[in-house]
Image (cartoon, coloured by chain):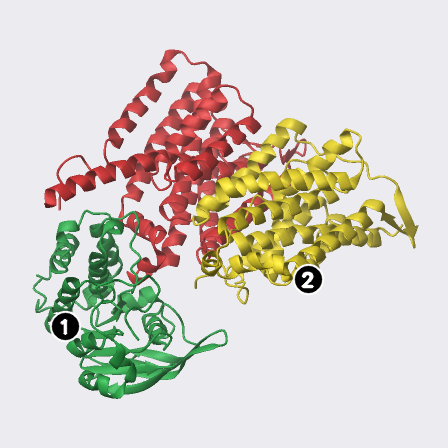
């Protein structure tokens, strides 16, 4: 049942490829280490935002504790390398596994709940992790240092210190791969089922969809990707702090997704990258940045609920429908 | 005719409101049974319990000899019971094709189990999911609108989409909840023809909930009249008007669709 | 001074103010029918108003309460009218949006007053009896909270409260009787936000004022509303006071951040273990 005309994905792959090309060449334009670092973190945040979009956008769950999975990954990397002395690759695998486990746990608890209560539960779980690790101190192997809380725990990499260029390109490659993977997942059968669930749970149930099982799966996949972003973050930044669990971070995930367009994957990824790079690149302090995000969120939710990419898609879709109607006549 | 479905001594209350009072309903294989009753009689609740949307307080539901009382709605879909909703709730961001695809994907195991090896449905056994979706859409008259967003369909088309979803899993039993209400005369006639052909070709049992005695007369082998959560009368559809006073006041199909939420036409 | 008794007494006093705040949240849940995550931010607003006034030499608690109420009411009506009302049918927008407003306020407060806790001078204790100090603010806040709660209960059961109850029960009827349902909604939102700010102003002298101070009262209020429903104001009172006592106790016996963790654990348990048997608006589970 092939449709004539533009590919159903529109011009998005082309635009993304162009953006990737620009990012690839940017360091050669002479950016200094600070800006490279800003962009590197931006890439990882973009993956984080995209990972939120799996459960939060595609499956329609109001997840306000996404930082739980991120922090689990960073803390696992930090603790296993600094305290247990494990090599980083091993710690990274453990971090991913623990993120997945956290995703499964959150999924099991959240799946039976209705919208606002999912928001409350995930918020509470994220805050609990944050509060717990804020007060939790760990002692370095020889007891010389106490780590934890806001000061954080160092992450030991044999390749340290990572050169800004290496970190930049590694993170960029990771972003490209992760975005491709998330888009594939979104267009898969599972992605279709998630979209159905977020559209009408009633119709989905009447279509044989096991709502609980598929919701749980969405959380697990989103958590795994968030964990991957966390591992990357731990490697690039070299430190895990309690802020990795913070509500501000969870909020940013939801905000980037809302502004970019829930359920589009590309929207959250681009929104995160652009907003973070712009705001941190111009030297605005963290409080000012988050404040701006909050403002952008409120304006978007009120006036453009579909987000940027969502609005573009809607326009493309109505154009297609007019076309199709014309063909049918 | 062996018994396909048995809803036995169903009791359901909402708060202090006793909606169903130990009602029992049975359906045989290949039967078309009508469920008639005024607003508040409990027929929709009974349908919700049989389809699995809502659990009963007491009583059980037995399907093909198996107790399915604890089974969720989606599990019942996969087991061969599907239903339509009086007010369809289409997926806001999916097209017609995609909407049907969801049901095809999730009903796959059940469909494969109930596949007719003799190909009575006219489909070769090795057809792909895409081909099956296509033939389903052709059959329900939605092929032309297949790339439309489901939310933009007319009421008549939405009902047909419900229909397509309901038959996609090759069910043995379909519950039709007021599927004719607020339809134009033409849509109604098309729907009746569709149901007739479906019944004739596949031998699916129907449980038709309707307040319209003319429709029930046309399609049903047997009618059950419910009032106050109990079976008031049971018999041939032609005798409905004789024994059930409420049937005398109902008129034909609705040209002017009533507002949502009301039981249009009756009384 | 018996520390435990003191802790319990202080817990009683703070609990009364938390009850006030929970009642406000219940109002929003019942009339506007949304789960409002910005409620804690209004509490914080009230506390900072009290701080600013105290900083300028206006030490009168009633002035602080009044100013807090007025400012919060204005903000609340604005937020309710421009954001909450239009998006209230979209749970995502409401939840994330109200959280967004809360975070916006937290960040603004941090930029203006800094992230570190500040405090207001408590003033002289009033009476010391039996080894327990009865502070002026404590008694005042307790009495005022009680009074306001009583006033709220009276208001709701009086003819003036009828529009609110009607909008809560059946908005179609309310609309068809000629009530401006939208207006009732945003006015209620403003009033409830003002109530939260009053609670913040009342408690300001007793607790550390920081940008994120509103999170604990928010979680506490949510627990109260989910667990006790919206019908009986006095259920709300007793549960809030109980939680306030528990929170104070755990802060004293363990450490301050454990009381927050305890509250978070309580709300998680509450949400997970099926809060059935509550009013329909609050019922959180489908299966």
Q: Which residue is depicted at the point 18% across and 79% down?
A: B217
User: Marks 1 and 2, Cα distance to the nearest angstrom?
Assistant: 60 Å
Asked where in the image residue C214 lies, by quadrant, the reply is: top right
Q: Which chain is green?
A: B
Q: Quadrant of residue C26?
A: bottom right
Residue C100 in percent (x, y) is at 52, 38
Left or right of C131 on screen, residue A311: left
Q: Give the residue at the far top of this rendering.
A: A30
Q: How many marks?
A: 2
Q: Nearer the viewer, residue B242 or C130?
A: B242
Residue A79 visible, this orientation? no
Q: Is residue C112 above or below residue C147?
A: above
Look at the numbered discs 1 and 2 and tell me whether their residues touch, using CB distance below 8 Å: no
Q: Chain of mark 1?
A: B
Disc 1 is placed on an element classified as helix
Residue to which mark 2 is pinned: C234
- Under tag 2, what secondary structure? helix
- Chain A is shown in which shade? red
Label 1 neighbour load within 10 Å: few <14, some 14-19, many 20+ = some
- Image spot of residue A300 (x, y percent): 42, 36
**Residue topped by disc 1:** B199
- Asked if residue A169 lies left or right of residue C8, the reply is left
Q: Are marks 1 and 2 on the same chain?
A: no
Task: Name the chain letter of the residue that bears numbered label 2.
Answer: C
Chain letter for yellow? C
If the image is split into quadrants, where does the C terminus of chain A sit? top left
Residue C145, given in percent of the width and then of the height, sits at: 73, 52
Q: Residues within 10 Å of mark 2 (few under 14, many from 20)?
A: some
Can residue B164 be seen from the camera position used here? Answer: yes
Image-based side of C177 in relation to C1, left or right: left
Could you tell me residue C182's position as x and y percent? Answer: 49, 49
């Amino acid at each position: 049942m092939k449709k004539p005309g533009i590919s159903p994905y529109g011009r998005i792959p082309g635009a993304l490829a162009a953006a990737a090309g620009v990012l690839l060449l940017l360091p050669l334009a002479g950016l200094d280490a600070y800006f490279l670092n800003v962009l590197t973190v931006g890439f990882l945040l973009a993956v984080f935002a995209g990972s939120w979009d799996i459960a939060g956008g595609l499956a329609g769950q109001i997840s306000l504790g996404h930082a739980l999975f991120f922090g689990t990954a960073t803390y696992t990397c930090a603790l296993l390398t600094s305290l247990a002395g494990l090599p980083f690759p091993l710690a990274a695998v453990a971090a991913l596994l623990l993120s997945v486990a956290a995703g499964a746990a959150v999924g099991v608890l959240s799946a039976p709940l209705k919208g606002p209560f999912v928001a409350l539960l995930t918020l509470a779980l994220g805050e609990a992790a944050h509060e717990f690790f804020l007060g939790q101190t760990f002692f370095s192997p020889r007891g010389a240092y106490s780590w934890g809380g806001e000061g954080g725990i160092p992450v030991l990499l044999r390749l340290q210190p990572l050169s800004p260029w290496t970190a930049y390109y590694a993170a960029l490659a990771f972003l490209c791969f992760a975005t491709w993977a998330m888009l594939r997942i979104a267009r898969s059968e599972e992605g279709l089922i998630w979209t159905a669930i977020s559209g009408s749970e009633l119709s989905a149930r009447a279509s044989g969809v096991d709502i609980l099982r598929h919701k749980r799966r969405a959380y697990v996949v989103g958590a795994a990707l968030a964990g991957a972003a966390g591992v990357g973050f731990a490697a690039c930044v070299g430190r895990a702090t309690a802020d990795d669990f913070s509500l501000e971070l969870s909020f940013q995930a939801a905000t980037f997704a809302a502004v970019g367009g829930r359920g589009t994957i590309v929207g959250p990824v681009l929104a995160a990258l652009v907003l973070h790079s712009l705001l941190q690149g111009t030297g605005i302090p963290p409080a000012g940045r988050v404040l701006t995000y909050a403002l952008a969120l409120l304006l978007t939710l009120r006036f453009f609920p579909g987000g940027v990419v969502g609005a573009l898609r809607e326009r493309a879709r109505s154009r297609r429908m007019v076309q199709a109607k014309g063909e049918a006549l | 005719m062996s018994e396909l479905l048995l809803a036995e001594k169903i009791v359901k209350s909402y708060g202090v409101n006793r909606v169903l009072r130990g009602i029992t309903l049975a359906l045989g294989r290949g039967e078309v049974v009508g469920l008639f009753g005024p607003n508040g009689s409990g027929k929709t609740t009974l349908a919700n319990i049989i389809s699995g949307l809502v659990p009963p307080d007491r009583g059980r539901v037995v399907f093909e000899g198996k107790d399915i009382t604890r089974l969720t709605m989606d599990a019942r879909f996969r087991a061969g019971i599907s239903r339509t909703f009086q007010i369809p709730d289409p997926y806001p961001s999916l097209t017609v094709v995609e909407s049907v695809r969801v049901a095809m994907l999730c009903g796959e195991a059940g469909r494969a189990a109930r596949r007719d090896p003799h190909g009575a449905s006219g489909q070769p056994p090795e057809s792909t999911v895409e081909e099956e979706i296509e033939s389903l859409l052709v059959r329900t008259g939605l092929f032309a609108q297949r790339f439309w967003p489901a939310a933009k369909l007319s009421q008549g088309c939405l009902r047909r989409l419900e229909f397509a979803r309901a038959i996609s899993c090759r069910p043995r039993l379909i519950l039709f909840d007021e599927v004719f209400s607020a339809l134009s005369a033409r849509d109604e006639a098309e729907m009746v023809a569709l149901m007739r052909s479906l019944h004739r070709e596949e031998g699916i049992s129907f449980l038709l909930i309707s307040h319209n005695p003319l429709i029930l007369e046309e399609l049903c082998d047997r009618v059950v009249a419910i009032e106050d959560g109990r079976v008031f009368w049971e018999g041939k559809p032609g005798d409905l008007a004789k024994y059930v006073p409420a049937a005398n006041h109902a008129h034909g199909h609705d040209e002017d669709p009533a507002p949502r939420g009301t039981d249009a036409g009756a009384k | 001074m018996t520390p435990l008794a003191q802790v319990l007494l202080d817990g009683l006093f703070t609990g009364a103010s938390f009850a006030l705040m929970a009642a406000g949240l219940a109002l929003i849940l019942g009339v506007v029918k949304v789960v409002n995550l910005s409620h804690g931010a209004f509490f914080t607003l009230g506390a900072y108003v009290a701080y600013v006034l105290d900083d300028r030499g206006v030490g009168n608690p009633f002035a602080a309460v009044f100013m807090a109420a007025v400012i919060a009411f204005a903000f609340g009506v604005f937020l309710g009218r421009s954001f909450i009302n239009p998006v209230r049918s979209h749970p995502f927008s409401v939840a994330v949006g109200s959280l967004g407003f809360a975070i916006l306020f937290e960040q603004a407060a941090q930029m203006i007053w800094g992230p570190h806790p500040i405090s207001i001078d408590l003033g002289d204790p009033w009476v010391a009896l039996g080894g327990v100090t009865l502070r002026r603010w404590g008694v005042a806040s307790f009495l005022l909270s009680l009074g306001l709660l009583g006033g709220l209960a009276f208001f709701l059961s009086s003819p003036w409260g009828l529009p609110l109850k009607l909008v809560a029960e059946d908005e179609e009827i309310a609309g068809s009787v000629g009530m401006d349902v939208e207006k009732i909604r945003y006015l209620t939102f403003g009033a409830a936000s003002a109530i939260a700010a009053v609670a913040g102003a009342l408690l300001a002298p007793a607790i550390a004022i920081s940008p994120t101070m509103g999170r604990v009262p928010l979680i506490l209020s949510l627990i109260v509303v989910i667990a006790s429903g919206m019908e009986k104001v006095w259920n709300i009172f007793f549960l809030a006071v109980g939680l306030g006592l528990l929170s104070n106790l755990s802060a004293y016996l363990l450490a301050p951040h454990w009381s927050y963790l305890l509250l978070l654990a309580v709300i998680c348990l509450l949400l997970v273990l099926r809060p059935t048997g509550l009013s329909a608006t609050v019922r959180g589970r489908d299966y």
